[in-house]
Amino acid sequence: MKPEMMLVAILLPVLGGAVVPLIPFKKRIHMEIYIESVVVLTTLIVAGLLLNRPSEPFPIVRFVNNLSLSLEIDGLSMVFAGLVAALWPLATLYSFEYMKHEKRERFFFMFYTITYGITLGIAFAEDMLTMYFFYELLTMVTVPLVLHTLTREAILASRKYLYYSLGGAAFAFIGLIFLLTYGTTINFTFGGVLDPAVIGGDKRTMLLLIYVIAFCGFGVKAAVSPFNSWLPQAGVAPTPVTALLHAVAVVKAGAFAIIRLTFYSFGPDFIRGSWAQNVVMGIVIFTIVYGCSRALKETHLKRRLAYSTISNLSYILFGVCIMTPMGLVGALSHMVFHAVMKICSFFCVGAVMYKTGKQYVHEIDGFGRRMPVVFGIFTIASLGLMGVPGLAGFISKWNLASAAVMSDNVMAYVGIGALLISALLTAIYMLSIVIRAFFPYKEKECAIPEETADPGWMMLVPLCIFAGAIIYFGLHSAPIVDFFTQIAGGTI
């Protein structure tokens, strides 16, 4: 396809979403058809771009010297853009039913659709400056989504999210400046762009420090400890928002940026074996254990899943920190498979909250018998997150553990222990929800509202597709893992 179609894919949901409050829809169904059409058309354009990649980049605007905003699709772009494009139409369909009883629907769907385009901008960025530009825009368009309910909790959560994101972006900007100074280019190049002629001696130590700073900066969106407290608080937003925050757009954008920073900017060969690798890997390992430990203690359904996300995101970063091709394969595997499993589990919890108003684990005793489809799918997602063989989560965890074993890195061996601890705790905090739903402790005392039932088709169709994907990827992962292997080898 023509290179300018990359810009079309970005602008279509941005402009299409921006006019939603201005169009005089006579019926709600007309608005739903319009929004879904914009989203599906964008996904079709993205599919065309991924199947027929443009042979050259597309410059949007040029500044001075080698600074520009430019778009290009490489192998890593294909993974992130394909993930976003596949999940967004289903998430939008789900949100139509969920948002029926919410106020300010039009403004919600305006920002919800715009976020799709901005996320594609991050995926299609040719260089660090372009990615940083869209990365900052992502913060701006998602703050109103967190703020949507305008409650005191939402205001505080959106404020914290904004402060953390802007602060993290400032640290990431430091990395951009040093890449401009010590790199041969800021275009993403597999293996890194640092100029070998100017990075020896004391400058190596300084650049390693800058890498750690930039890693933590982008890591704010990826919810690494201790910069993760914004994520559970953001759960006050409507479930379609939190699902995208926790599974697709925001947190995966942070992980994606760290992959770009490590493998396409500083370069794994420059960092591997240094103190900087041990520092970032130590942060990631601690976050894995911390996230699942907090999830075990949490009784609020969405916040429990939020802490689970904190832990699982660091699985991805653990693969990145191994800094080997196999580590990158594991990271990409978990980035994709976790997105499907986590959005599925969030949407199941959202369906429970939508139909019953219940928000805590102890309030759902016996609900599995009234909502068998929702809790059956939630069980599949839970088993996947645990890493049960035959489901998607097992494949990504196996790839990560294999990469750690082959790395001959002592810290990576510690990471394997963290993965095992996390798997055990994940089994406890996820299956405890399933067991209470299907097998209540005191069955006679369960007061289940009469209206408790599975939701309508707009919610159930995405859930069933997600559940099918979790099973399919668990049984037929070879083609997608082979594709990740080509990316990790620098051939795509």
Image: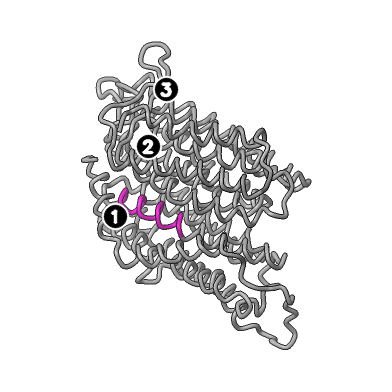
Q: Secondary structure at mark 2?
A: helix
* Left-right relation of 478 to 71: left
Q: Residue 258 versus residue 188: which sits nearer the camera?
A: 188
- Magenta range: 327-340
x and y, in percent, of residue 253 in the image: 47, 41
* Left-right relation of 105 to 2: right
Q: Residue 339 versus residue 81: which sits nearer the camera?
A: 81
x and y, in percent, of residue 319 in the image: 36, 51
Q: Residue 18 versus residue 194: which sits nearer the camera?
A: 18
Q: Is residue 300 above or below residue 59?
A: below
Answer with mark 1 or mark 3, whichever residue precedes in sequence: 3
Answer with mark 3 or mark 2, whichever residue precedes in sequence: 3
Label 1 to label 3: alpha-carbon separation: 30 Å
Q: Secondary structure at mark 3?
A: strand
Which of the image's four quarters has the C terminus? Answer: top left
- Quick check: is 333 in the magenta stretch? yes
Residue 212: quarter of image = top left
Label 3 to label 2: alpha-carbon separation: 16 Å
Q: Which residue is denoted by mark 1 in the rendering?
A: 480
x and y, in percent, of residue 32 in the image: 59, 48
Which of the image's four quarters has the N terminus? Answer: top left
Instruction: Looking at this view, name the residue that lies furthest to the top.
Output: 64
Mark 3 is surrounded, within 10 Å at the Cα level, by few (under 14), some (14 to 19) or many (20 or more) other residues, namely: many
Q: Which residue is denoted by mark 2 in the rendering?
A: 260
Q: Secondary structure at mark 1?
A: helix
Q: Amino acid at mark 1?
A: Ile
Q: Residue 454 versus residue 398: which sits nearer the camera?
A: 454
